């Protein structure tokens, strides 16, 4: 018997045995679902959120099973990733193609002076693993664009866009709408910013609210930003992410929150789905 | 069936954390007897349980909570 036919013989035999077993064996009783429990360490670590009336075992377990992609490991990505890791998010993917620069350190809380020159995704991932070793942190040193956004977003439970360019925001919004992945958008400049949660197909998307990028939109590098302003906006973004993942409170959807930190004014602006939106109208 | 929980070794807020998590595992109408030390826990746990909508009665150092 040749090697090829021998392999074929055993393969055939295996399938015969399998089908015979299938025919004679009584149907196995359905496995009872594994009761999901928090460990002693988790109860201790998350006790200050578990104690909240809105939070509890269900919310904690929902978070621990979540896959979240954070796009950008800078001024917004730092508080987002820190709070999500601290709160016990199951897996955090962190995308950034930049390296840590001295001018980043006044606002990007995950990076420190010895990190200068280190890829931000790696620098951030290292700190997050120190913060919470139970969280799976996956750094991706790459730049998100319209070509790769779809593949990055696929399979995520939530995307938090902490990028600093309108092109990236529109690419991420389009990809999240196409894949029906919830998204938290935000931006910060100077002492103001905005935050918006998007449930594709159900609430207004980023392009519904902002159909066109501003012609002369300044970038952070040009316009400047105060560290705590980015911290506030990023913290709001993290809170939105936790709301969307657990349902413990309604998210800022069908509109956005505009935050003026010079005057301490928080303004809720409504937005509606556009029937002609190129990103979400078909979703 | 009445469940029981001993929180005598714990301090605030873990006293209520443990009680709350135990209540979350129970069905409505089930009872939980929580044994705690006199003092802070005996004041706080019944109050938190009532605020969460459960029926509460205190017998000595034991708090009986019927899950809402």
Image (cartoon, rainbow, N blue to C red):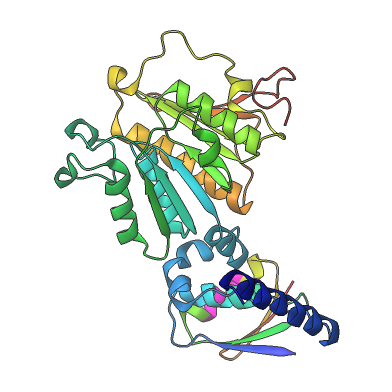
Q: Is residue A280 magenta?
A: no
Q: In which quadrant is the C terminus of chain B drawn?
A: bottom right
Relative horizontal placement of residue A177, taking residue A266 as reference (left or right): right
Measuring from the top left, give residue A143's x and y in whole percent. 39, 33
Q: Residue at x 46, y 26 (%)?
A: A168
Q: For residue A219, which quarter of the picture?
A: top left
- Magenta span of residues: B42-48
User: Compared with residue A7, is residue A242 higher up or lower down, i.e. above or below?
Assistant: above
User: Compared with residue A73, is residue A60 higher up or lower down, i.e. above or below?
Assistant: below
Q: In which quadrant is the N terminus of chain B drawn?
A: bottom right
Kindly give the residue lying farthest to the front in the view shown: A1
Q: Is residue B47 magenta?
A: yes
Measuring from the top left, give residue A88's x and y in whole percent. 46, 60
Kindly give the residue lying farthest to the left in the view shown: A114
Measuring from the top left, give residue A96's x and y in whole percent. 36, 38
Query: Chief secondary structure of the magenta span?
Result: helix
User: Compared with residue A250, is residue A149 higher up or lower down, i.e. above or below?
Assistant: above
**Most foreground residue, A66 or A225:** A66
Q: Residue at x 52, y 87 (%)?
A: B36
**Most foreground residue, B30 or B63:** B30
Relative horizontal placement of residue A119, taking residue A113 as reference (left or right): right
Q: Residue at x 50, y 29 (%)?
A: A147
Measuring from the top left, give residue A198's x and y in whole percent. 61, 35
**Most foreground residue, B40 or B16:** B16
Kindly give the residue lying farthest to the top in the view shown: A215
């Amino acid at each position: 018997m040749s090697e090829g036919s021998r392999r074929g013989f055993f393969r055939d035999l295996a399938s015969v045995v399998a089908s015979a077993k299938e025919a004679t064996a009584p149907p196995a009783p359905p496995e009872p679902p594994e009761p999901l429990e928090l460990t002693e360490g988790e109860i201790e670590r998350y006790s200050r959120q578990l104690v909240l009336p809105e939070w509890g075992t269900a919310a904690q377990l929902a978070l621990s099973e979540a896959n979240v992609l954070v796009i950008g490991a800078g001024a917004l990505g730092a508080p987002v990733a820190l709070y999500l890791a601290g709160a016990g998010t199951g897996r955090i993917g962190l995308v950034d193609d930049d390296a840590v620069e001295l001018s980043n350190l006044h606002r990007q809380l995950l990076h420190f002076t010895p990190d200068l020159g280190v890829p931000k995704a790696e620098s951030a991932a290292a700190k997050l693993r120190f913060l919470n070793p139970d969280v799976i942190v996956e750094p991706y040193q790459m730049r998100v664009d319209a070509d790769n956004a779809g593949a990055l977003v696929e399979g995520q439970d939530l995307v938090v866009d902490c990028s600093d360019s309108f092109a990236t925001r529109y690419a991420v919004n389009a990809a999240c709408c196409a894949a029906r992945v919830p998204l938290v958008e935000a931006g910060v400049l100077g002492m103001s910013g905005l935050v918006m949660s998007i449930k594709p197909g159900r609430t207004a998307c980023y392009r519904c609210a902002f159909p066109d990028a501003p012609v002369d939109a300044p970038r952070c590098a040009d316009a400047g930003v105060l560290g705590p302003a980015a911290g506030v906006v990023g913290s709001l973004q993290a809170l939105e992410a936790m709301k969307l993942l657990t349902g413990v409170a309604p998210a800022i959807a069908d509109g956005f929150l505009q935050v003026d930190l010079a005057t301490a004014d928080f303004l809720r602006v409504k937005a509606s789905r556009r029937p002609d939106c190129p990103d979400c109208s078909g979703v | 069936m009445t469940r029981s929980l001993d929180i005598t070794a714990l301090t605030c807020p873990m006293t209520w954390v443990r009680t709350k998590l135990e209540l979350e595992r129970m069905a409505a109408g089930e009872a939980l007897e929580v044994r705690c030390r006199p003092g802070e826990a005996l004041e706080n746990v019944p109050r938190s349980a009532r605020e969460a909508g459960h029926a509460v009665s205190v017998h000595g150092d034991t708090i009986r909570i019927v899950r809402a």
